[in-house]
Image (spheres, helix red, strand yellow):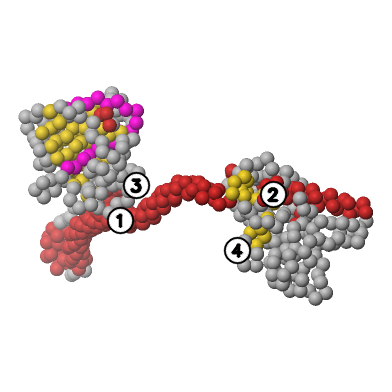
Amino acid sequence: MASGSSLPEDRFSCPICCDVFKDPVVLACGHSFCEVCQQEYWADKKPWKCPVCRRRFPVAMTQPPRNLALNDACEAFLQERRQRASSGSEIQDGSQRASSGSEIQDGSQRASSGSEIQDGSQRASSGSEIQDGSQRASSGSEIQDGSQRASSGSEIQDGRQRASSGSEVLCSLHGEKFKLFCLKDKQPICLVCRDSKVHKSHDCVPVDEVVQDLKEELHTALKPLLKNLEVFNNVKLACDKTAEHIKSQVQHTEKQMRKEFEKLHQFLRDEEAARIATLREEEEQKSQMMRKKIDEMSRKISYLSDAIGTIEEELKDEDISFLQNFRTTKERSQYTLLDPKLVSGVLIDEAKHLGNLQFRVWEKMLGILKYTPVILDPNTAHPSLSLTDDLTSVRRPGTSQQFVNNPERFMRYTNVLGSEGFSSGIHSWELEVGDHPDWVLGVAKESIDRKRQRDATPKNGMWCISQHGGKYIGGGGDIIALKRRPQRIRVQLDYNRGEVYFYDPKYMTPIYTLKVRSTERLFPYFNIGNVANGNNPGIQICQSKVSLKVK
C-alpha cells in the first residue's frame, strides 16, 4: 500500500478533535471521524447530523461502518511521522516542479535526509492529468483529489478524485479506476484494493454487474416509499379540505346562533315593552283616580270657604239686619261635610311588576322554547342527506351535498346518527314518519363500520326496525304484522336492561322489542331510503313537552 505522506497532514485529522484519526468511521455523506468522537458528538444531539455538512441521518445509521482504508492510511502516516521524528529529517510533501514548470515528474522523489514513497503515480504531459494525492502542476490545469478545501471550510472527501472533465472517479489510495464492488463493505474498489489485506478475503464483483442489481434493489425499496407518499398526499389533501369545511361550518353555525339569539332578544324586547306598557296603564288608572279625588276635594273646599265667608259677613251686619238673617245663617252654619279620607290602593303595585320578574319572563318563554330529545349529528350524515337548520329533521333530496369524508361520516348508506350517545338509563324519542315508504329506525353502537356495506342487524351493531314499501321488518329479519300504519314511531331504549322498544305512540301499542347486547355507547340511528315518485318527504324528530316545577 502506498504511503499517505504525499497528502497534507490535515487529510488525516478528525474534524472534531483535530487529531489524527483513531478507529475512523465513515458516514453515508462521505465524511469520516474518530469512532469515539462521532459517538460523543451524537450522544446529546438529536436529530443526528454530520458535523461537517449537517446532513441528517435516521436511527439506523447511528452505528456507521469502519473506514478501513483511511485507518490503514493513518497508521502509515503515523509510522512515517515517528520515523521522521527519530531521524530528525523532514519528508518532502508533494512533487518537485521543473524549472520550466511544464512537466511533472513521473514517480516519486526522495528528500536528501530520508526516503518517502509517493502515494500514487504522477503523470507528465502538459499538466492536464490528475495527480494522486491532490497535486497540481505549475500550469494549474489539473483538479486536485476532491478532498482539499480552503482553511475556512475544509472537508474530507470519501476517497474520490475527479478528472478535470468531471467524468471519471479514481481510487484515492491508488489512483486507479473503480472496477470492482466489495459486497461486504458495500463500496467500490480498484484492482489494487482487491489484492490488499483489507479486501483480500471479501467477495467482490464487477461494477457493471452489481449496479443493475443494486438499482433494482433500490427501485423495490422505493415502491413502498412512493405508496406511502401518495397516502400522505391524500391525507394532506383531505386535511386541507377539512380545514376549509371547518371555516364553512363556523360561518353557518354562527349565522344560525345569531338567528336563534335574535329570536330570544326579540322576545325579551317584546316582553319588556309589554310589561312597561302595563306599568303605564296602571299609572294612568291610578292617576285618574287621584285626579277625581283632588277635584272632589277642591269642590268641597270651595263650598266650605263660601259658607264661612257668608257667616263672617253676617256677623258684621247691623243688629236688626243680623237678627232678621240669623235663622238662615244659623241653618247654613249647621250644614257640615263628612271628614275626607285618603284613598287606598292607588299606589303603583311594584311587587306585581318587579317580583320574580326574571322567573316569570322565563316561565312565559317556555311557550316559545323548543326541546327535542334527539339532535341529529351533521358530521355523521351521508352526503345525500339534507338536515334542517335546527338539526331535528332529515330528508333525501336526491342530490349530494358538499361534505368532507371525515371518519365519523357514513359513506356507503344514507345514514345519520344522533349527536348524543347513551351508556345508562332510559331514553325515548318519537319520530314523525308520515307516509314515507322507506326508512330504518333504532339504535346503533358507536363503533359500527361507517364506510362499507353493512346491513342494519344486531350482528353488525344495529338494533332497528324498517319499513320498505308498506312492509315492516324487525331487526331479526322477521315480518311485523300491524293492524294500522303508524304515522309516528316511538323508540325507547332501556340501556340497563338491554332492551329497545318500538311503539305506536297514538295508541301506545307495542310494535317490536329487541334485546341489546353492547357495552358501548348507543346512538339513535336513522336511515332514509329513496322515493321513486320524486316526492321526498322527511322524517321529523318530535318535540317533547317542557314543564316547569318549583319546589
Are there few (<14), some (14-19), or many (20+) residues within 10 Å of tag 4? Answer: few
Closer to the observer: label 3 or label 1?
Answer: 3
- Residue 477 percent across, percent down from the top left: 17, 28
Distance (Cα) linking label 2 and label 4: 21 Å
- Residue bearing mark 4: 167
Residue pictured at 63% horizontal, 59% vertical: 169
Part of the protein shown in magenta: 512-529
Residue 55 — which label?
none
> Can residue 202 be seen here?
yes
Q: Is residue 525 magenta?
A: yes
Q: Quadrant of the C terminus?
A: top left
Distance (Cα) linking label 4 and label 1: 64 Å
Residue pictured at 79% horizontal, 53% vertical: 3
Give amino acid for label 4. Ser
- Residues tagged 1 and 2 counted as in contact (Cβ below 8 A): no
- Residue bearing mark 1: 252
- Residue 99 percent across, percent down from the top left: 83, 74
Indicate left or right for 137 with 164 as reference: right
Closer to the observer: label 1 or label 2?
Answer: 2
